[in-house]
Image (cartoon, helix red, strand yellow):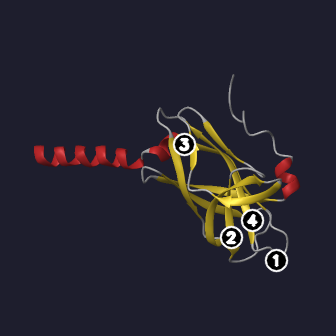
Amino acid sequence: MKKVSLLFSALCLSAGAWAGAADQITVQEPYVRLAPPNAPATGAFMVLKNNGDKDVKLLKADNPASKVTELHNHINDNGVMKMRPVAAVEIKAKGEAVLKPGSLHVMLIDLKAPLKEGDSVPLTLSFDDGSSKTVDAKVVRPGAAAAMPPMQHQGHKH
């Protein structure tokens, strides 16, 4: 009986370690921008808050709505704004990373079918410790996304 108890304890501990960074990250207001008709790509945006004591890196995102999913940033290249893939998005301990239009974001490339306003796209976010979490991002019109309340203090009690 002791062996079973020890095995169970070890499994519980390893399961807790397996969850890792994903348990420390909260995702606020995830949404996908409604793409214009026939557009092959769109972006997903959110705030990633790290409630843990260690820095975390978002290494990858995935979704079933597009064939390719990449982490991107906008850069100013000699006065020309360009989008470029990034290897990771760093989320500092007790800090946040804001993924927003014109900045860091998740690109959904080569959409499998047109997205409709109100649809929900499951986004799986994978972190540097091997853990992941899936969030549902609602598809919204660009104007509707801009009209959303500011992301920084949603749900906070001061």
Q: Position of residue 112 (x, y in %)?
A: 68, 77
CB within 8 Å, label 4 to label 1: no
Tell me whether the residue at label 2 lies in contact with that at label 1, contact meaning CB atoms closer than 8 angstroms: no
Farthest front residue in view: 78
Q: Residue at x 59, y 34 (%)?
A: 95
Q: Which residue is mark 3?
A: 25
Of tags 2 and 3, which is closer to the observer?
2
From the image, tell me which residue sits under label 2.
Answer: 109
Between the C-alphas of marks 2 and 3, the distance is 25 Å
Judging by the rendered image, the residue that carries numbered circle 1 is 38
- In which quadrant of the rendered image does the C terminus lie? top right
- Mark 3 neighbour density, 10 Å: few (under 14) some (14–19) many (20 or more): many
Q: Which residue is mark 4?
A: 42
Q: Amino acid at mark 3?
A: Ile
Lower position in the chain sequence, tag 2 or tag 3: 3
Q: Secondary structure at mark 2?
A: strand
Q: Residue at x 41, y 48 (%)?
A: 19
Query: How far, Cα to Cα, is label 2 from label 1?
Result: 12 Å
Residues under labels 4 and 1: Cα distance? 11 Å
Q: Secondary structure at mark 3?
A: strand
Return the disc, 1 or 3, that comes first in the chain's sequence.
3
